[in-house]
Amino acid sequence: MTVLPAYFPSPPQGVWHLGPLPIRAYALFIIAGIVVALVLGDRRWAARGGERGVIYDIALWAVPFGLVGGRLYHLATDWRTYWGPGGAGFGAALRIWDGGLGIWGAVALGGVGTWIGCRRRGIPLPAFADALAPGLILAQAIGRLGNYFNQELYGRETTLPWGLEIFYRRDPSGYVDPHSLDGVSTGQLAFVVQPTFLYELLWNLLVFAVLIYADRRFTLGHGRLFALYVAGYCVGRFCVELLRDDTATHIAGIRINVFTATFVFIGAVVYMMAAPKGREAPESLHGNDFSAGEPQQRPEPATEALAEPATVAVQAEPATVVVESPEVAPREAEAAETAAAEEEAAPEENEDAPETSEAEPPQAEASEPETSEPETSEASEAEPGADEPAKATEGGGGSKRRWPRPRKRSSGS
């Protein structure tokens, strides 16, 4: 008895019908890959200092451009499938949900859409591409599962134990073919092939891990991480293309995607070497919300609020000096002059001075004692014999003349 290798089978079908609506596995995995790329890219963009949610606005430009570019590249490289002898025709060329997207065209034209979106938001394209790169390669890995359900993009026939079983499928019209996208497996084995879709899926996951590590270890920026993604993918795609045996355009007996992978790899390496080192400043990733002048206007109210009290303080300080200084100096001078003049002009009032001066101390204490103390002390030391006449004169004068006298009496006692 012959023991067959334990190959793994293909899915029995790649489409399910919800009433008249066909639900295709290929389309579901493409959508899932786009969602994963956007969610991961949004988180990475915010971690670099960008605004959350911006990536979804730019995706409105990038995703449609990418789908159209991917389809155009597929049609350009596999044109015989649609317009060659016995081709499917122009109608089949428009049915993108049946499969057939070229990653080279998707990245190229999707990059144009991304550039338009970034330009409208004032965001640097290289920095945005760096944030999106790991999500893109992960989306490609998810999208390869759609090729698995479609029984496409496989390699040469093989006897390896991990070979992929391809079964005949019968479509609704009764036509049986292993390449039928609408059919259901008949259970009849057609052939066993190299699962090149699986090789590329695993390679993409490896590149994803390398990108995450390199970004954290070397802080790549200015588009260098995106270039590393492109170069890494090209290496894997180059090897996978050498194993594929499906219909494709050849140049000099070599599949066209081999040439594409080679030239794109060289361009990515050159860019990595020429791009600036380091990473962009976080404030440069804010886009038009910060370049339109609004952030420069936000700090102004706070600046004015801090400047106004300082201005008031500067203006109020001289006013305080002007009010206080003119009052103290004239009182001291007036007190000294009045004391000297009254001591000479009124010696006859000596007898009334004790009674009057003793009644006035409360008023004298209520006035400014500290200011008058030095002046009265000097007057008493200069003329000790004129103490009593000065007291009598002060008792008969007004309040301004009475306030220095208690101090003079205390100094003479």
Image: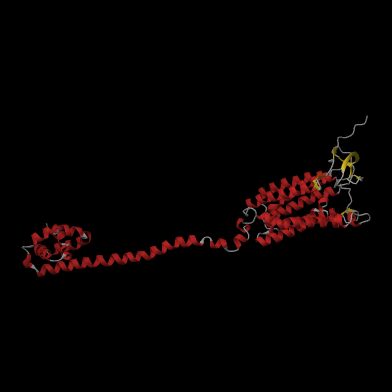
- What residue do we see at 79% from left, 57% from top? 69
- What residue do we see at 49% from left, 61% from top? 301
The colour scheme is secondary structure
Kindly give the residue lying farthest to the front in the view shown.
19
Closer to the camera in the image, 118 or 27: 27
- Labels in figure, total: 0
Closer to the camera in the image, 334 or 27: 27
Quick check: can you spot residue 221? no
> Can you say which quadrant of the picture contains the C terminus?
bottom left
Q: In which quadrant of the rendered view does residue 57 lie?
A: bottom right
Residue 220 image point, x, y percent: 67, 52
- What residue do we see at 55% from left, 62% from top? 296
Residue 288 image point, x, y percent: 62, 61
Residue 360 image point, x, y percent: 14, 59
142 up-or-down from 108: above or below: above
Closer to the camera in the image, 230 or 141: 141
Closer to the camera in the image, 407 or 352: 352
Residue 387 image point, x, y percent: 10, 62
